[in-house]
């Protein structure tokens, strides 16, 4: 239950608990990155040649590589560490040769790097049963699928072996408490919060070593609370010591995060969910929810990223706690609205219990822990491109005729996507499969499917597209000051021949974000076209396609695919971030933006994609303003918005950081679905962050 | 149909009264405070504003107009490919302003906020202001004012607003005239009306180092505050370092400089001593 007095204390009187010396030492050490120098290269050079020569199956290769990776690890315990495990070996090489990759890509659709990503493993169940329990089932089922279960058993053994080596080291160093914990987990169920955190760390560690990524963390407060509750009841922990442990747990996500294989470092998928309701519909909010928010506020690290599930019944002070975190400028929490997401998932065929248990993927998509083998970012559809192609095909006729062409273009793009992603192949993940109950009882690797096998498609550049249709409707079909061919010709010339028209389009035609139905109605229309186009499609795994409102990195890529657009966007200008107004649009303010962006029916387009609002940091300068901003978030949710990302930025600081990066090593910004250290971003992303709509109050 | 000139309607102010507010900025002001950070609010007439830092020097604005000197025709605002030019100051009817503000009615109410009338000087267009206050009586209405107006105008508006944010820039008539161009006698007269009326108000003092942050002025201000029936508090507003930011865009020069803030001084002491609730707010 939400304790109003505690929250008030936390926010306004600053009597919250603070970092202990032990944590401070660990924190400083990790931030100094010195531990990275303890890492060695992966020992054996060319695994792929060896595996190829020996003719190992893909599953066997994954298991063999994991076993070698864990074997090569040298246990290291940092001073004061209570939650052990730290990578001392860099990432293992690939399991396929170039020739094999070529053959794979010719035969299959490979998503991103080919390894399993962006799902939420069912950590909680295994933490409560222990790995031996899964091993026993694997042994019992071995005759039914010997390659799969053979891999499962070997993987579990390798993980346990490493834990034992850590236990030995702990004992040698005189830390008998830790040694005992590591003999307990991960073999047996966790009994205390510390054991649960340790168990999680080991599982997560092993997943990264196996080669999966964007393995989100799940429902932190729901999953770990039973352990905290029993610790408190039995006097093992109080709020202060629970806070300390939570801080250490959070720090652990920053120890090896640089080993994330992707290019954009902040985008490593270490995202957790707080709040919401459980599968029976009961509100989830407990001491861990608050400790997580407090810890994140104090630590100011980019991991773990925090998602807050809310609904129309969430009280204001929950939003105040969230806003306090927003103020730190970390680019989270991101808010997801249960009132929209749960019915939307149910509409798509998720069971009510599973829908209520949703978590958020690496960026914003909604996935089910322990049950979903979904590729929620398998493709992206550019709305502005659909319009660009449609208008080229349109000759005469009225505006409805143009819209019909847009619809048919969207249908065609969706069909192409569905075709393109056929013959999907995902590299097996034997250890990951340990964390999916259905894989054990279903006798198959997670990479071949789970209970839910849906795909998600981003719908990019909605505001640009809505504004484009509004502009065409006005200029070509209502005012008739240009014919369509004339308009298109000027547009393809980047409007250089007609600056009056350009000015009119950019600054004097309706824009989405001003609570103006003349533009807003097209967003709803386009999203409906998108979800209708996907409705009849099914993928090879019996899954559906989910329409989304996110733009992700496509705001640059998709914008580069077309030239200027009918809304007056010039060639090479990017789209807005995710689901937000066009960057150059003159916007009346946040309420207008919220009003515009909460009009569509999101239950039909439930892949996620947040409205992104950015406020100048000075807005948060007074504590009393926290409540004001919190009211705004609450308003967004009550209006039926599905997802909101609120950021505190300061364009002057960002520009300064571009020029003097050495002065801003820890400046954090939200990029599109994740946060990053600003100075580590490529210039074009930096520029985009700076150019976004910024409300100074 | 009552009309008036507005130079901005800003959604979501957090500094203009309780809760979330939409602030309506009325154009025109009788004062000329040297530190004013809304130079486009001074003249009651629409005027051209240019964002120099967005200008790409294409010259299309001049080409479209053809006049050697700017006569504020406004043709250029439709010619600039980057939208650098705008007219500040739009004539609107009371109904148009009301509809625009009511777009946010739900959030304004649910946050315990409302609408604030500011500027410029809202009392400078008394008929318009009266019309707006009546039309928006469904919301909490705050008037942010320098207090410079006739007693007749002030009395009329006094009965219509829910809260006043009343500036007291300086208590000495000579100093006030020196820095704002006007004597403060009408302001203090109106203050007394306000103080006796029981209508809730907050005294605002924009702290201008070297001008009004001296001990004597602060004590005098505190004494004035102590006399008020409806006083809800005093806010000392930290000097806005970016006060000059918009001057270039309206073709003016900001030529006021003030010494650095003396961070060590306790400006709130004179208020505390009289038991007055006072806070210092950093701006920007």
Image (spheres, grey):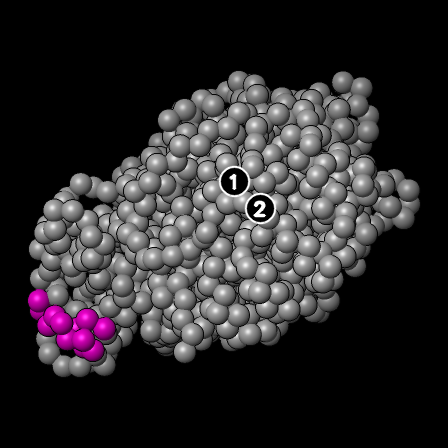
Q: Give coordinates of residue A630: x percent, y percent.
A: 62, 56
Image quarter in which the N terminus of chain A is found = bottom right
Q: Quadrant of residue B223?
A: top right
Q: Nearer the viewer, residue A281 or A618?
A: A618
Q: Nearer the viewer, residue A32 or A263?
A: A32
- Vertical comparison of B46 with B169: above or below: below
Q: Give coordinates of residue B55: x percent, y percent.
A: 24, 42
Q: Is-magenta flag for residue A477? A: yes
| Mark 1, residue position | B177
Judged by its main secondary structure, the magenta piece is helix
| Mark 2, residue position | B184
Q: Is residue A526 left or right of residue A38?
A: left
> Do marks 1 and 2 share a subunit?
yes
Sequence-first disc among 1 and 2: 1
Q: Give coordinates of residue A298: x percent, y percent.
A: 67, 36
Q: Is-magenta flag for residue A331? A: no
Observer able to see residue B253: yes
How many numbered marks have been drawn onto this rendered protein structure?
Answer: 2
Q: Is residue A259 left or right of residue A411?
A: right
Query: 10 Å neighbourhood of mark 1: few (<14), some, or many (≥20)?
Result: some
CB under 8 Å between callouts 1 and 2? yes
Q: Residue at x 46, y 29 (%)?
A: B257
Q: Give coordinates of residue B70: x percent, y percent.
A: 19, 49
Per the rendered image, the range of residues in magenta is: A474-486
């Amino acid at each position: 239950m939400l304790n109003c007095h505690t929250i008030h204390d936390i926010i306004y009187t600053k009597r919250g608990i603070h970092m202990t010396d032990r944590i401070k030492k660990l924190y400083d050490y990790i931030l100094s990155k010195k531990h990275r120098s303890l890492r060695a290269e992966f020992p054996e050079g060319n695994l792929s040649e060896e595996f190829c020569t020996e003719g190992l199956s893909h599953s066997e290769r994954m298991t063999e590589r994991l076993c070698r990776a864990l074997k090569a690890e040298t246990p290291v315990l940092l001073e004061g560490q209570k939650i052990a495990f730290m990578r001392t070996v860099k990432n293992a090489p690939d399991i396929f040769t170039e020739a094999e990759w070529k053959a794979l890509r010719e035969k299959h659709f490979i998503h991103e790097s080919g390894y399993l990503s962006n799902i939420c493993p069912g950590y909680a169940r295994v933490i409560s049963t222990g790995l031996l329990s899964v091993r026993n089932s694997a042994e019992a089922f071995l005759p039914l699928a010997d390659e799969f279960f053979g891999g499962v058993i070997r993987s579990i053994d390798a993980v346990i072996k490493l834990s034992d080596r850590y236990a030995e080291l702990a004992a040698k160093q005189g830390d008998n408490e830790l040694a005992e914990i590591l003999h307990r987990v991960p073999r047996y169920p966790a009994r205390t919060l510390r054991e649960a955190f340790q168990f999680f760390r080991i599982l997560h560690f092993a997943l990264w070593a196996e080669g999966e990524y964007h393995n989100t963390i799940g429902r932190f407060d729901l999953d770990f609370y039973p352990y905290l509750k029993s610790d408190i009841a039995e006097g093992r922990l109080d709020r202060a010591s629970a806070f300390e442990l939570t801080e250490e747990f959070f720090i652990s996500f920053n120890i090896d995060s640089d080993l994330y294989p992707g290019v954009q470092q902040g985008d490593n998928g270490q995202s957790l969910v707080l709040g919401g309701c459980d599968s029976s519909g009961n509100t989830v909010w407990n001491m861990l929810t608050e400790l997580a928010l407090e810890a994140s506020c104090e630590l100011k690290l980019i991991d773990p990223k925090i998602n807050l599930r809310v609904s129309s019944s969430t009280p204001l002070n929950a939003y105040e706690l969230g806003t306090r975190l927003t103020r730190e400028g970390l680019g989270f929490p991101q808010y997801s609205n249960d009132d929209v997401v749960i019915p939307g998932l149910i509409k798509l065929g998720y069971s009510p219990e599973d829908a209520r248990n949703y978590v958020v993927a690496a960026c914003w998509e909604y996935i089910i822990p322990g049950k979903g083998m979904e590729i929620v970012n398998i493709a992206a559809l550019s709305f502005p491109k659909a319009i660009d192609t449609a208008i080229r095909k349109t000759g005469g006729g009225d505006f409805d005729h143009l819209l019909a062409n847009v619809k048919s273009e969207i249908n065609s793009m969706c069909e192409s996507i569905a075709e393109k992603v056929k013959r999907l192949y995902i590299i097996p993940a034997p250890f990951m499969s340990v964390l999916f109950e259905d894989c054990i009882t279903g006798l198959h690797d997670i990479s071949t499917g789970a209970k839910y096998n849906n795909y998600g498609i981003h719908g990019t550049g909605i505001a640009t597209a809505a504004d484009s249709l509004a502009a065409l409707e006005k200029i070509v079909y209502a005012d008739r000051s240009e014919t369509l061919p004339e308009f298109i010709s000027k547009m393809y010339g980047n409007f250089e021949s007609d600056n009056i028209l350009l000015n009119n389009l950019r600054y004097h035609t309706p824009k989405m974000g001003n609570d103006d139905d003349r533009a807003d109605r097209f967003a709803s229309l386009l999203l409906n076209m998108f979800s209708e186009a996907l409705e009849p499609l099914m993928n090879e795994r019996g899954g559906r396609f989910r329409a989304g409102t996110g733009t992700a990195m496509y705001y640059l890529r998709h914008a580069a695919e077309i030239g200027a657009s009918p809304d007056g966007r010039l060639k090479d200008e990017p789209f807005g971030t995710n689901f937000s107004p066009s960057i150059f649009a003159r916007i009346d303010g946040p309420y207008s933006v919220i009003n515009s962006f909460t009009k569509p029916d999101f239950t039909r387009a439930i892949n996620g994609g947040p409205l992104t609002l950015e406020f100048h940091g000075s807005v948060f300068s007074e504590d009393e303003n926290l409540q004001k901003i919190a009211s705004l978030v609450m308003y967004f949710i009550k209006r039926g918005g599905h997802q909101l990302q609120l950021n505190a930025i300061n364009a002057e600081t960002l520009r300064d950081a571009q020029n003097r990066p050495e002065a801003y090593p820890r400046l954090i910004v939200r990029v599109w679905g994740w946060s990053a250290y600003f100075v580590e971003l490529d210039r074009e992303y930096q520029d985009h962050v700076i150019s976004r709509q910024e409300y100074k109050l | 149909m009552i009309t008036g000139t507005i130079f901005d309607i800003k959604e979501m102010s957090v500094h203009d009264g309780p809760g979330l507010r939409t602030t309506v900025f009325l154009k025109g002001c009788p004062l000329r405070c040297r530190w004013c950070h809304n130079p486009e609010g001074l003249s009651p007439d629409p005027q051209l504003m240019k964002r120099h830092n967005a200008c790409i020097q294409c010259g299309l604005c001049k080409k479209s107009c053809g006049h050697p000197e700017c006569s504020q025709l406004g043709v250029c605002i439709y010619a600039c490919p980057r939208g650098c030019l705008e007219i500040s100051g739009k004539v609107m009817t009371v109904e148009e302003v009301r509809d625009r503000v009511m777009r946010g009615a739900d959030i304004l109410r649910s946050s315990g906020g409302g609408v604030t009338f500011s500027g410029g000087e809202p009392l400078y267009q008394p008929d318009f202001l009266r019309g707006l206050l009546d039309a928006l009586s469904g919301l909490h209405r705050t008037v942010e004012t320098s207090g410079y107006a006739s007693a007749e105008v002030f009395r009329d508006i006094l009965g219509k607003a829910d809260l006043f944010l009343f500036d007291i820039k300086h208590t000495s008539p000579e100093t006030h005239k020196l820095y704002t161009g006007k004597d403060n006698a009408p302001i203090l007269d109106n203050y007394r009306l306000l103080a006796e009326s029981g209508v809730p108000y907050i005294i605002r003092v924009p702290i201008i180092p070297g001008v009004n942050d001296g001990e004597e002025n602060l004590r005098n201000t505190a004494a004035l505050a102590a006399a008020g029936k409806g006083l809800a508090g005093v806010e000392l507003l930290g000097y806005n370092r970016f006060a000059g930011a918009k001057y270039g865009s309206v073709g003016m020069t900001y030529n006021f400089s003030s010494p650095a803030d003396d961070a060590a001084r306790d400006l709130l002491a004179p208020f505390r001593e009289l038991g007055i609730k006072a806070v210092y707010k950093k701006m920007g």
